[in-house]
Image: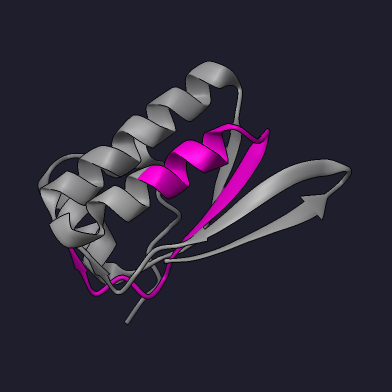
Amino acid sequence: MGRTSDKTGGASARQLVLPADCRLAAGPGLRAALLEALALPASALDAGAVERVDTAALQLLAAFRRDAAARGHDTRWLGASAALHEAAGLLGLERILDLPAARPA
C-alpha cells in the first residue's frame, strides 16, 4: 500500500493509496496505515485502483471513517473504484464510507 505524507495549508495530512487487491491479506497493513493516519489532522484516501475488496477491508474503512469523524479528523476521498462502490453498496456501507460519486464506465 502506497503512503505519502504532505503538508496542506500548514496541517499535516496522510495520503493512503489502497492496493488493487484490498482483501484479508491486506488487512494488517491497511489497519496500521489507517491508525497512523488518525494521528494526523487530515488524510486522503485513494481507492481508484481497487479491483477486489472484501468485507474485512470494508469494515476497517468504516471503522476508520467513524473514528476519524469522532476525532474531528478531516478525511477525503481522492477516488473510489467501481469495485469498491459495488461492494460497499452490497453491504449498505456507501453512506457510512461517504464515497465520492461513482464515475460512469
Q: Which residues are magenta?
A: 32-53
Residue at position x 40%, y 45% from top? 32
- Identify whether 60 is placed above or below 51: above
The front one of 79 and 3 is 3
- The colour scheme applied to this rendered structure is one colour
Quadrant containing the C terminus is: bottom left
- Identify whether 64 is placed above or below 82: above
Quadrant position of residue 91: top left
Residue at position x 56%, y 47% from top? 76
Quadrant containing the N terminus is: bottom left
Q: Residue furthest right?
A: 10
Q: Is residue 95 visible?
A: no
The front one of 1 and 44 is 1
- Identify whether 92 is placed above or below 18: above
Residue at position x 88%, y 43% from top? 10
From the top left corner, tell me how far across and down residue 36 is, in percent: 52, 41
Q: How many marks?
A: 0
From the top left corner, tell me how far across and down residue 89 is, in percent: 18, 50
Position of residue 86 in the picture relative to residue 98 (left or right): left
Quadrant position of residue 87: bottom left
From the top left corner, tell me how far across and down residue 43 is, in percent: 60, 46
Residue at position x 28%, y 69% from top? 82
Position of residue 104 in the picture relative to residue 8 (left or right): left
Quadrant position of residue 80: bottom left
Q: Is residue 14 visible?
A: yes
Magenta stretch: includes residue 59:
no
